Image: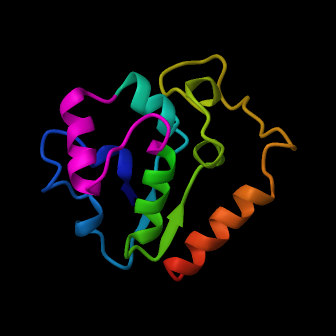
Amino acid sequence: MKVLQFAFGENTAGSPHIPHHHERDFVVYTGTHDNNTTLGWYREELTAPARRAIRQYCGTDVHEDNICETMIRMAYASVAETAIVPMQDILKHDAGSRMNKPGTTGGNWTWRMPADEFDLLLTEKLRQLTGLYDR
């Protein structure tokens, strides 16, 4: 199990969660049900050095508007056999859509995807990534 949100810490290059250390028999996630959404993580938890590490690793400007797409692309590009992306990341939701906060007893597992949020544009973007990365 590889979680991309865990890759960008003190030792990004050596992190077992960074894509260049993935192997075929892994499952890669942008984040799990116990993590903040990717946008929430970027806004609320990611340090300035970790933000720089993401930009350096991706070789492009990464910011609030494209962090979800960047992490999804990273997961799809991984050699890991399976890539799992929480719907909240696909929909670019912030921390308000977090699924679970470990160690808390209230407000968990209540998020539901609004039926009208997953549209043809998102379908096409996922289809393109699926084809591009042979998933």
Seen in the picture, residue 13 relative to 103 is either above or below; the reply is: below
Examine the image and state in which quarter residue 10 appears: top left
Name the quadrant of the C terminus: bottom right
Q: Percent position (x, y) of residue 98?
A: 59, 30
The residue shown at (27%, 36%) is 51
- At 36% across and 44% down in the image, what residue appears? 5
In the picture as drawn, the residue positioned furthest to the front comes out as: 61
Up the image or down, 59 lies above or below 50; here it is below
Residue at 31%, 75% in the rendered image: 23
**Residue 41 % position (x, y):** 43, 32
Left or right of 99, for residue 6: left
Q: Which image quarter is the N terminus in?
A: bottom left
Comparing 7 with 125, the one in front is 125
- Asked if residue 7 lies in the magenta stretch, the reply is no
Residue at the (52%, 26%) spot, across then down = 101
Looking at the rendering, the stretch of residues picked out in magenta corresponds to: 46-67
Tell me where residue 70 appears, x and y as whole percent. 43, 52
Seen in the picture, residue 110 relative to 22 is either above or below; the reply is above
What scheme was used to colour the molecule? rainbow
Report the residue that reaches farthest toward the right: 115
- Total marks placed: 0
Image quadrant in which you'd find residue 108:
top right
Is residue 106 toward the left or the right of residue 104 in the image?
A: right
Residue 129 vertical position relative to residue 63 in the rendered view, above or below:
below
Does the magenta segment cover residue 66?
yes
| Residue 11: % across, % down | 12, 46
